[in-house]
Image: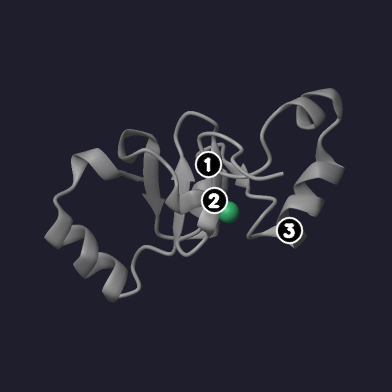
Amino acid sequence: MIRHDHIDGAALHRMIRDGRLTFAGNRRLKIFGRLDCRAGRRLARANRVFFTSRSEAERSGYRPCARCLPAAYDVWKSTVKSGIQIARGPVAHQDRATDS
Ligand SMILES: [Zn+2]
């Protein structure tokens, strides 16, 4: 896991271009999603982290974004015991819900 505010822009772009970073996450919400997710792009830099794989994100305790990884989100949701937390919490890896 790489924190956006702990890596310089050139190194980051090189890793994305080389396909070494495939998912981005919200460090505060512990939600990860695709790099091109519109919800993820609205993240504050300090809250954004990058992963090299989906399994790395899951191992780090992050769950899938409902917006850009709906199938993975459904699987995750069905494996969670309590539905209360999901209903109340944000579903996408953004800082705030700006659209309904
Ligand atoms: Zn997303």
Amino acid carrying label 3: it is Pro
Instruction: Decide if ligand 1 comes within 8 Å of the CB at mark 2.
Output: yes
Residue type, numbered disc 2: Ala
Q: Quadrant of ligand 1?
A: bottom right
Closest to the observer, 45 or 2: 45
- Residue 6 rendering spot, x and y as whole percentages: 20, 40
Residue 66: x and y in percent read: 70, 51
Is 96 in front, or is 83? Answer: 96
64 sits left or right of 87 in the view = left
Mark carried by residue 94:
1
Q: Which residue is mark 2?
A: 39
Identity of the residue furthest to the bottom in this view: 18
User: Dot 2, how many residues are within 10 Å of its Cα: few (below 14), some (14-19), or many (20+)?
Assistant: many
Secondary element at image label 3: helix
Disc 1 within 8 angstroms of ligand 1 (CB): yes
Q: Residues within 10 Å of mark 3 (few under 14, many from 20)?
A: some
Up-down relation of residue 63 to residue 69 (above or below): above
The quarter of the displayed image where residue 62 is located: top right
Q: CA distance from mark 1 to mark 3?
A: 15 Å
